[in-house]
Amino acid sequence: MPSPQKSSASLPPETQSGEDDSLLAEFTRKLTESRRLYVVDPATGSVSEEPIVIDGPGSFECREGARIMVENGSRQSTETLVGIVLSSSMALGGKPVRCSGVVPGVTMSVSTGLFKLHDGEEWDGAVDGMWKAIRSKLVDWLTTRSPSPGLTIGLNSGVEFEFGWDGPYRIDEGAMQIDIRHDPAFAATYYRRRRQRPLVERAATREEVSQAHAATISRLLIDALEKCRRTWEPLFARLPVPIRYRVTGALAAWQTLWQQMDVPSRESLMTALRTQPIPKLVRQFADSVVGALPQVQSDWPPGELRLVASQSAVWQAFEVRNGVFYEPTPALHRLLDASFVADDVPVGMLKLPAETLCIIPEPSSWNRPNGIEAIVLFRGEQSISLATWSHPADGSEEAVADLLNLSSSAPDKTIQALLDDVFRVSTSGDENLRQHWRGALDYAIKMLLYLTVREAHVVHDRAYTDAPRNFSGLGKRKRAERLAEIEQLYDRHIVGPAILDAGPTHGLSADDGHREVRGHWRRPHFKMQPHGPNASLRKLVFIGPTIVRPDRLGL
């Protein structure tokens, strides 16, 4: 896993809606919405003179025997009132709570019984699910020309709703009483239109719309981060890192989030993902995510939320910038490992074949100490941003992500001089980091130089794009399995020969009786070769493994 980093993109801050472990917070939040509240003392029957000001969890005492009066009930939707009663019952340990006037002339009682939230489930989502489960039955009952006096609806875990028309149906007292007051004119209008409009519904206020939108953004953001975290699971270890984000649904989850964002925020984020240097983007994006989800940090190991957000920023940018994959053949991988770059090769020889690309080294090297799983390059105006996924030299199983910006503003500077500058400025004396970047940059640069030379072997493999997706003869399960297999494929440019014609021969003796150069293999390398009139021009060439003085090899 990569080391944590700071970040911040244009995501709207989350609206605080109470602690997950405090059902009372949900109750009090709903009770503060556009109505005046009074408490009746159960012992004396006296009503408080001043409205209760509810400003957070614990400021409203939800206790057995309490009675709450809500004025101007027409301002509240039936859905909201049902949610309040549900929250009250949960706050009282599942005991029944009675509510008169849930719609004019109807009393209800709710008991949540033994209901418990599932892991990761939010109370708002649970209430929404219960409301959807009872809504159609309640509407049918209210719109019947001659309805039965009462209606009882049972759900899982002992949750029970009881509705009754005032007068012909009697609902027992509950552990707590909520009375909704309706204006007589509103009640008369409701009775006339009951069959056409059985539920009280109202347009949400601007603040409520904003709160609902912020809650949706938070929910989608958490879902995307959870799917990003799944990319660390051993199940996906054999796949290239960016493909794991597609297979787990992380990229799709981010796209869903983007579509739900307001236009200015979405445009700001898209601009950052398309144009910002990656180190800056990662810092800003992680800062934004951590700032938007302060309550989530306590549920994750220290630093992990920032870490996951940082990683995901790289692959979102890769997706938005239409990144492509370059993958060396095993033969070229060995060749690049053995080759070197001559001191005279300038930075100007580094030509990226695409604006954004990901180099996937040979998979057998991924899990070795200092093994690199992916090198991602983003071309900017005056720099190349790089991100790497690798395994530390101590043999740890956890992958590490690192970021670096490589200046391309001086094309005549030699690559060796550029690397010396990078290591002097960017690695802060960390020898392990210096060693990591020297290996990663060496590999990436040699791959880019190989792609520049005229005789480079490159094959465009369109495995994902060309995969057949019409499985008319398969059942639903088999079809889903085949589609899941296709999601693990990816389009790539396969670089290098399938096999090498010959390899270095080690351990062969040379003729010691001569003082001339001994026979040996010369390492493959990149260098600038003179050409043109009077050898006045220079071009980049790749010299493969070469036998020097083969006549002196002891065969």
Image (spheres, rainbow, N blue to C red):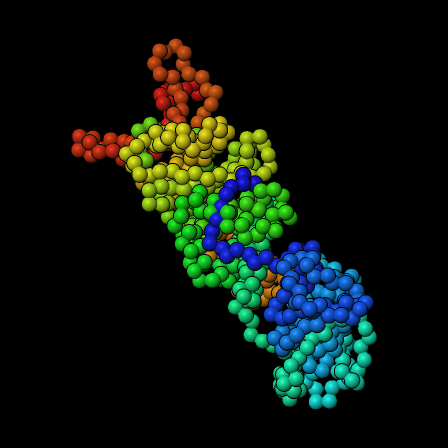
Q: Position of residue 122 (x, y in %)?
A: 66, 59
Q: Residue at x 55, y 33 (%)?
A: 392
On the rendered structure, is 486 left or right of 102? left
Q: Residue at x 70, y 59 (%)?
A: 23
On the rendered structure, is 402 left or right of 517? right
Identify the image quadrant of the C terminus: top left
Residue 367 figure quarter? top right
Identify the image quadrant of the N terminus: top right
Q: Residue at x 45, y 31 (%)?
A: 427
Between residue 191 and residue 62, name the one nearer to us.
62
Q: Position of residue 452 (x, y in %)?
A: 33, 40
Up-down relation of residue 494 to residue 57 (above or below):
above
Q: Residue at x 67, y 57 (%)?
A: 57
Up-down relation of residue 521 to residue 14 (above or below):
above
Q: Position of residue 332 (x, y in %)?
A: 43, 37
Up-down relation of residue 267 to residue 435 (above or below):
below
Q: Position of residue 84 (x, y in %)?
A: 69, 68
On the rendered structure, is 112 left or right of 489? right
Q: Is residue 327 visible?
A: no
Between residue 84 and residue 9, name the one nearer to us.
84
Farthest left residue in view: 533
Q: Is residue 189 visible?
A: yes
On the rendered structure, is 269 left or right of 13? left
Up-down relation of residue 439 to residue 224 (above or below):
above
Between residue 180 and residue 429, name the one nearer to us.
180
All told, the count of numbered labels is 0
